[in-house]
Amino acid sequence: MKKINGIIMQYFEWYMNCNQNLWNDIAKNASELADIGITALWLPPAYKGIGGKDEVGYGVYDVYDLGEFDQKGTIKTKYGSKDEYLNCIQVLNQAGIEAYADIVLNHKMGADMLQTIPANKVEWGNHNIEEQKEETVRVATKFTFPGRKHKYSDFEWNWTHFDGIDYDEKSKEHAIFKFKDKDWSVAVDEEFGNYDYLMGADLDFKNPEVVEECNKWGKWYLELTEVDGFRLDAVKHINALFYRDWIRKLRKESGEGLFTVGEYWSGDISKLHRYIQETEGEISLFDVPLHYNFYNASNDPNYDLSQILEHTLLEENSSKAVTFVDNHDTQPRTKLAKFCRRMV
């Protein structure tokens, strides 16, 4: 029987130095974690990133490489090898702890080849405003994964699978370039006019090839790892209907409940309600408004604690709320932590 009020532990932080041995450390400590009441572990992104052995996991390069192939200067990821990852999940389950995988599908980084294509620059402050003058850019959008040699998937990514990027190798300019004949996705956050674009080569979820490949990968990943659920990264930047359909498909095919929580980073409770409605209740959300209330309470000696739950997901839709105090994004020295402090 599933525990109604479990405790999820985020078992990593941004600056950790685990010597490519985190999966083994988790396996070693699984029984002790269970003894102190931990019911689930949020594991960091397990796939190869642009930073190789130093990549935290959010600069995604190859989602099929879980520490198995010699890519980006390393075989293991920052956290260990594929076999160590799979063993870690098994040991956690044997100890009665569920394993939740961090899923990062918004963007890709570290392409294997450049492509020259037409694009229009858009304003940083409003992504809906683009320059009328079309230009030719040279961008990192061709992913062939030569180290993997098509094992698990022969899909190769090219510029048509993305809708924008933030660097032109030709001009050495950092700007947001929207590719010719592309439009930003809808059902995303309206910050900056449209917050589809976040970083890297931004996946175009309007392209049926992209959706099909993400569905195939999700099925492969779930069957291989047998994780118990997911933490979805940056959901405010991805069409909500994609993730609604993605998780429904995986649940139907696997016959598993697959607890899923999304990171919709906003202190505006109405946006969280809207996302839950758009995804038809398939996905829980981190209670970011409550996080901000905690922050304000800790910095104001006169804070009225009777108001701590006001305008929070815990108060207004508790069955979809995952509460937290801090995470890897809000810890000191990270860019988002500085951004969050400016917001409050």
Image (cartoon, rainbow, N blue to C red):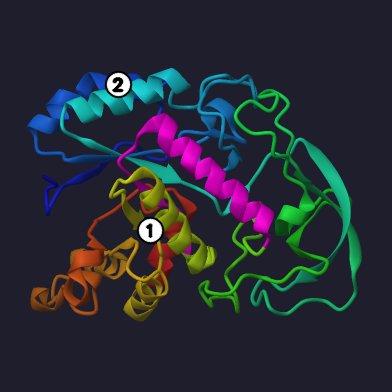
The answer to whether residue 36 is above or below residue 114 is above
Q: Which residue is mark 2?
A: 25
Under tag 1, what secondary structure? strand
The answer to whether residue 104 is above or below residue 173 is above
Q: Residue at x 62, y 70 (%)?
A: 185
Of residues 2 and 115, the one drawn nearer to the viewer in this rendering = 2
Occupied quadrant, residue 263: bottom left
Mark 1 in CB contact with mark 2 (< 8 angstroms): no
Under tag 2, what secondary structure? helix
Q: Residue at x 35, y 34 (%)?
A: 226
Q: Residue at x 61, y 51 (%)?
A: 212
Q: Residues within 10 Å of mark 2 (few under 14, many from 20)?
A: some
Image x and y of residue 214, in percent: 56, 48
Label 1 amino acid?
Gly
* Cα distance in 3D space between marks 1 and 2: 26 Å
Q: Is residue 292 left or right of residue 314?
A: right
* Mark nearer the viewer, 1 or 2: 1
Q: Which residue is mark 1?
A: 262
Image x and y of residue 56, in percent: 48, 37
Q: Residue at x 10, y 73 (%)?
A: 305
Image x and y of residue 134, in percent: 90, 70
The answer to whether residue 231 is above or below residue 128 is above
Occupied quadrant, residue 21: top left
The magenta-colored residue range is 207-235
Label 2 amino acid?
Asp
- Magenta span: predominant SS is helix
In what quadrant of the picture does the N terminus appear? top left
Residue 145 can be seen in this image:
yes
